[in-house]
Amino acid sequence: MKIIGIGDSVVDFYKHEGLIYPGGNAVNVIVSAKRNGAKESAYLGIVGNDGEGKHILESLNSENIDISRVRKVYGPTGEAIISLTEDGDRQFIGTNRAVRVQSLLSLRLNQEDMDFIDAYDLIHTSINSDLENELPKLAHKDISFDFSTTDRWNNDYLEKVCPFIHYAFFSGSDMSLKEIYELIEQVHDYGVEIVGITRGEDNAVFSRNGKIYKQNPLPTKLVDTMGAGDSFIGGFLAAYHEGKDMEHALYVAAQSAAMTCECSGAFGYGKKKEESNKIVL
C-alpha cells in the first residue's frame, strides 16, 4: 500500500522542555503508516522557510517519506504550544495560528500535484488541512479523513465532506455510546464505508458498512499521548487497506498507538527550539 498525506504540518513546542517535535495530523498518520508496513509514503503540504519547517522536512526524510511536492514559503511554520500533565496527557496551551503560513495560504492542487498523487493508493487528510474544496478532484482515489473532536465539525460539514471519502475517523472521548452509534449511522448514510471513533483509554468503536468492531487499548509504558490517535489511524490504514481484515487491522492500530505513547512527541525527533527559530533565507 502506498499512502500520501495532504495538508497540515506543525511543530509541537513542549514549553516545559524547550523542545520542538514534528507533528500535524497528515504528517503523523503517514509516518505511522510507513512504520507499520506501507510500501511508500509521501507528504504534500506547506511549511515555512524557518528552522521549524526545516526540522519537519529533515524528520520526514529520516523516515523515508517523499517530500518532493512540499511548498516551502516565506513565513513561520505552524506551532502548537504543549504542556503535559503529571500522567503524561497532553494539553494545548497556545498556537501561532494567526501568523503561520498554513493559515495565511491555501493549498491548491495543480496538474503536477495530481499526477504525483495518482501514483498512490490512498490519500489521508483532515479537518486541519482546509482541503474541503479540493476533495471533488481527489474523489477518484480512496480518501481517509480525520474529523477530530466534536467541537470541530457539525452536520453541514459532514454533509459537505463525507460524499467524497472512504474512511472517516473521529475523536470521541466525550461522546456516549448512543451518540457514537448515531454518528456512525449518519456517516454511513453519506456513503462512507469505514467509520472509526477512537476514545482514548476506552475501546475504539469502528464500523464497516454497519458491522461494529471494538478494540481495547493495549498495555503501554506511558510517556506521552501526543499523536496516539494519529498513530492508531496510520496503523489501521496500513494493515487494512490491502488485506481488508478489520480485526487484524484494529489490533495493529492499537499496537501502533501503544508504541507511540512510549516516546515523546508524535513520533520523536525532539530538538531544542532555540537551535531552529531563525528564518532561513
Image (cartoon, rainbow, N blue to C red):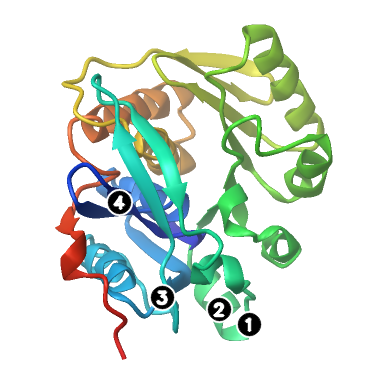
Q: Position of residue 55 (x, y in %)?
A: 25, 67
N-term mark: 4 or 1: 4
User: Pointer 4: what residue?
Assistant: 13
**How busy is the neighbourhood of tag 1: few (under 14 within 10 Å), some, or many (20 plus)?**
few
Q: Residue at x 74, y 30 (%)?
A: 188
Q: Amino acid at mark 2?
A: Asp
Q: Residue at x 51, y 72 (%)?
A: 101
N-term mark: 3 or 1: 3
Task: Specify the quadrant that holds the C terminus.
Answer: bottom left
Q: Is residue 208 left or right of residue 198?
A: right
Return the mark for residue 48. Answer: 3
User: Pointer 2: what residue?
Assistant: 113
**How busy is the neighbourhood of tag 4: few (under 14 within 10 Å), some, or many (20 plus)?**
many
| Residue 200 to residue 273: above or below | above
Question: Given this view, does label 3 or label 1 mark the residue nearer the observer?
Answer: 3
Marks 3 and 2: CB-CB under 8 Å?
A: no
Q: Secondary structure at mark 3?
A: strand
User: Pointer 1: what residue?
Assistant: 110
Q: Secondary structure at mark 4?
A: strand
Question: Given this view, does label 3 or label 2 mark the residue nearer the observer?
Answer: 3
Q: Amino acid at mark 3?
A: Gly
